[in-house]
Image: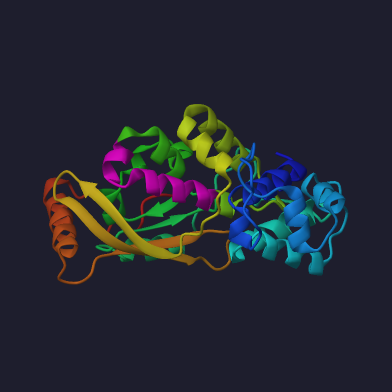
């Protein structure tokens, strides 16, 4: 996907979500052929000519001043993540350097040894390390019991997004699958840096767009999201529904790896059920892995 196309898609999607009355303009007296603001309305709000904004949206403008970008960001009501993404897109098509992602075609990103040991030591708290592409690089036993056993998958399949859209069991695991799927695709969008040449990510998006019409529609929506903290509702056939919290931390010294830890409020029903689930797992499986280590290399 070229940067001009991405810039056009991004700005068009942001216009489409706004109504004139959302930005202080009078409502349209007649129905519009397309939802959202017109280019000329964005231009008026940003204080630029219609021709200039149209050429910007089409990727036919060179370097854009910070003042103009700020005005467009405010006109389109962009949040901090969207502003960062817009500036990365503009930098790319304006001739900024585009570097290759650290892992290229045919290579497999991994979590460093100390990080895998840390994830393993967090048992019985479910924990995992993911790459920027949401490949699962390390997961402890509690994480596998809670979600799925990524160890049993082929390396290319150890990916949260791929699992979410291609494994029917994922829809069982998440009672709120629609919301989880939407946020996950938006997070993958948000993690896609236009300044990086990343054929592995483009391949993942292409494969999932063919395999799942739901993924394709969500990707085309161009929503951005960042998993930092929040709540997740999960279902396990052994104990029922678990309402958990999660915290996600960036891993220093990596290109976008994150550590996610799930917790339950102490003394809550979810806490009791999570303990019961892990106790059930401990008594039903043979001890085959060394304690204190995450199992994905």
How far across and how far down the image is residue 143, in percent?
Answer: 31, 54
How far across and how far down the image is residue 12, in percent?
Answer: 68, 46
Whether residue 250 is situated above or below residue 196 in the rendered picture: below
User: Relative to residue 149, is residue 13 drawn left or right?
Assistant: right
Task: State the count of labels.
Answer: 0
Give whichever of 154, 174 is nearer the camera.
Answer: 174
Image coloring type: rainbow
Q: Residue at x 58, y 59 (%)?
A: 22
Q: Is residue 177 magenta?
A: yes
Give whichever of 161, 15 is nearer the camera.
Answer: 15
Residue ranking furthest to the top: 210
Image quadrant where one finds the N terminus: top right
What segment carries the magenta color? 169-188
Residue ranking furthest to the bottom: 266
Give whichever of 73, 83 is nearer the camera.
Answer: 73
Residue 164 position by quadrant: top left
How far across and how far down the image is residue 253, in percent?
Answer: 58, 66
Q: Is most of the magenta stretch helix, strand or loop? A: helix
Residue 169 position by quadrant: top left
Whether residue 28 is situated above or below residue 210 in the rendered picture: below
User: Relative to residue 75, is residue 258 drawn left or right?
Assistant: left
Residue 292 in sight from this viewpoint: no
How far across and how far down the image is residue 65, in percent?
Answer: 84, 65
Whether residue 45 is situated above or below residue 166 in the rendered picture: below
């Amino acid at each position: 996907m070229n940067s001009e196309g991405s810039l056009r898609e991004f700005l068009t999607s942001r216009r489409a979500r706004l109504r004139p009355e959302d930005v202080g303009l009078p409502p349209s007296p007649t129905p519009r052929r397309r939802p959202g603001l017109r280019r000329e309305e964005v231009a008026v709000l940003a204080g630029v000519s219609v021709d200039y904004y149209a050429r910007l949206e089409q990727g036919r403008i060179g370097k854009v001043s910070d003042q103009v970008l700020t005005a467009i960001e405010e006109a389109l009501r962009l949040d901090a993540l969207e502003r960062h993404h817009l500036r990365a897109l503009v930098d790319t098509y304006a001739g900024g350097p585009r570097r290759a992602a650290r892992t290229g075609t045919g290579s497999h990103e991994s979590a460093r040894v100390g990080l895998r040991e840390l994830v393993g030591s967090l048992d019985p708290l479910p924990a995992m390390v993911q790459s920027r592409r949401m490949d699962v690089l390390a997961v402890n036993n509690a994480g596998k019991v809670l979600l799925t056993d990524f160890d049993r998958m082929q390396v290319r399949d150890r990916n949260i997004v791929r699992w979410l859209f291609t494994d029917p069991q994922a829809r069982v695991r998440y009672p709120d699958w629609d919301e989880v799927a939407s946020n996950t695709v938006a997070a993958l969008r948000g993690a896609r840096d236009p300044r990086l040449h990343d054929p592995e990510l483009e391949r993942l998006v292409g494969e999932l767009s063919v395999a799942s019409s739901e993924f394709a529609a969500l990707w085309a929506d161009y929503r951005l999201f960042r998993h930092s903290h929040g709540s997740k509702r999960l279902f396990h056939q052994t104990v029922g529904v678990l309402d958990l919290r999660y915290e996600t931390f960036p891993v220093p010294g990596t290109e976008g790896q994150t550590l996610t830890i799930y917790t339950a409020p102490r003394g809550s029903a979810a806490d009791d059920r999570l303990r019961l689930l892990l106790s059930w797992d401990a008594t039903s499986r043979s001890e085959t892995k060394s304690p204190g280590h995450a199992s994905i290399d």
